[in-house]
Amino acid sequence: MATIHQQATLPELTTDELSRYSRHLILPEVGIEGQQKLKAARVLCVGTGGLGSPLLFYLAAAGVGTLGLVDFDVVDASNLQRQIIHSTKDIGRKKLDSAAEKLTALNPALNVIKHETMLTSLNALEILKDYDIVADGTDNFPTRYLVNDACVLLGKPNVYGSIFRFEGQASVFATKDGPCYRCLYSEPPPPGLVPSCAEGGVLGILPGLVGVIQATEVIKLILGKGESLAGRLLLVDALNMRFRELKLRKNPECPVCGAHPTVTQLIDYQQFCGIGPENKEEKILKNGIPQITVRELKRRMDAGEDVQLIDVREPFEYQIAQIGGKLIPQNDVPQRLAEIDREREVIVHCKSGVRSQRIAEFLVKMGYPRVVNLTGGIMAWADEIDPKVTKY
Amino acid sequence: MTIYIPTPLRSFAGGQDTVEVAASTIAGALEGLTQAHPELRKHLFSAEGKLRAFVNLYLNDEDVRYLPEKEATAVKAADTLSIIPSIAGGD
């Protein structure tokens, strides 16, 4: 397996490091030279959340010399169910600062470089170029395609992990002869089809499992030992504790890493993923469905207007918080159309506006003449209208 | 043969994580699946009947796109078909 470091001189290990990494030095696969390679390595971790937490901790523990962190988010209580690099006292604090503090507490010799920014086509190449390996711990499709393309263009391996509910995927993309993310999935799903962790939920331990798999792959790439996941897709089913492996092939016609690439620059990834620019006008239509803001809904309720509000979340969500909507869980809607009055305007809401958009589109297909989607859902209501409504 | 249904699509397959179908080819197995669970059709296939680009199909551990006969490949009862959609969660 090709090694990352072909440089002539590797950094010397200090006496402290010889002691700290003794368990590595004893291993034939690591030894002093391997530990030196780890010390010389520069790894960029995009995202310091679910996947980033275990990934960064273990890379710091292993003695990786330089860790770059990319994040622009702030610690929220709901993160603490799984983002173990952050603590309760960090709520409200920048994730970068919180993560950097814990990493240097574990390993004071670590060189942490903070990139407090959203990764975009304008800055990705510049940020990635000084690192040897990139670990993708992001949570959305546009960024995943951006990271992939940037890694291929720069020739940096992309250690990939992703999660959904209780399933995970892991692989290594963009190695010299291996496939890239686009070889596997040439196009992203339409927005809203695959919910985010906030919408779909995620078993807290799952990013722990997958993040450490990613850390393992990073370390193996640095050491040049073992067989990496390049060319394989590891599937993790935590609920049934089954691990499966599928073969991945480099697509000779891949637009980014194929023999005749057509993508030679970073593109607009929001557009690629079908996410249009934010429209600040009054009448916003999404797939033909008019959108309503929480402020507008509040205004109508206060004005005593006739509001038929349908809540398509699950019963357990309704128990946590509700805003007076009629609860018809999304999967029950087709069987309970009789309870939704066709003669009145229907306002559909859910937690953040994704499920309700889908149900709104379904109702329109079923012939409902006036259907509106509540943008931002009950979360936006809690943020903008009534902070007493519990966020979850 | 057994078809593995991924988490994002289970609600369209009656909540099941596997579905058994009798078929002699991959295409036949998919047809059997969407006959039994018609809601799956639009999530798996475009209007023109092509498998959507964000869904991959594997016969055992091989990507169907790279099999010489693709969806026309013959299948045995002990084979498995896996539907693997892209997922992006990480936070």
Image (cartoon, coloured by chain):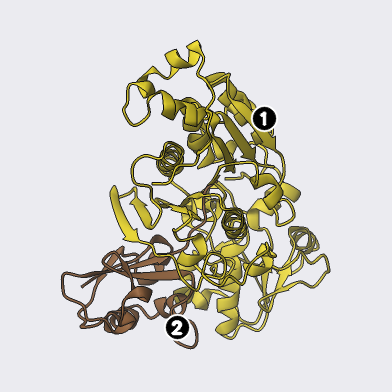
Q: Position of residue A259 (x, y in %)?
A: 52, 70
3D distance between C-alphas at marks 2 and 1:
47 Å
Residue A22 occupies quadrant: top left
Q: Residues within 10 Å of mark 2 (few under 14, many from 20)?
A: few
Q: Position of residue A209 (x, y in %)?
A: 40, 41
Q: Secondary structure at mark 1?
A: helix
Residue A211 occupies quadrant: top left
Q: Position of residue A196 (x, y in %)?
A: 54, 55
> Looking at this view, is A110 or A315 the one in front?
A110
Chain A colour in the picture: yellow
Q: Is residue A126 visible?
A: yes
Q: Secondary structure at mark 2?
A: loop
A96 shown above or below B53: above
Q: Which residue is label 1 attached to? A: A97
Residue at position x 52%, y 51% from top? A197
Q: Amino acid at mark 1?
A: Asp
Which residue is at the far left?
B77
Q: Which residue is label 2 attached to? A: B50
Q: Chain of mark 1?
A: A
Q: Are marks 2 and 1 in contact (CB under 8 Å)?
A: no
Q: Is residue A385 visible?
A: no
Chain B colour in the picture: brown
Residue B6 lies left or right of residue A107; in this view the side is left
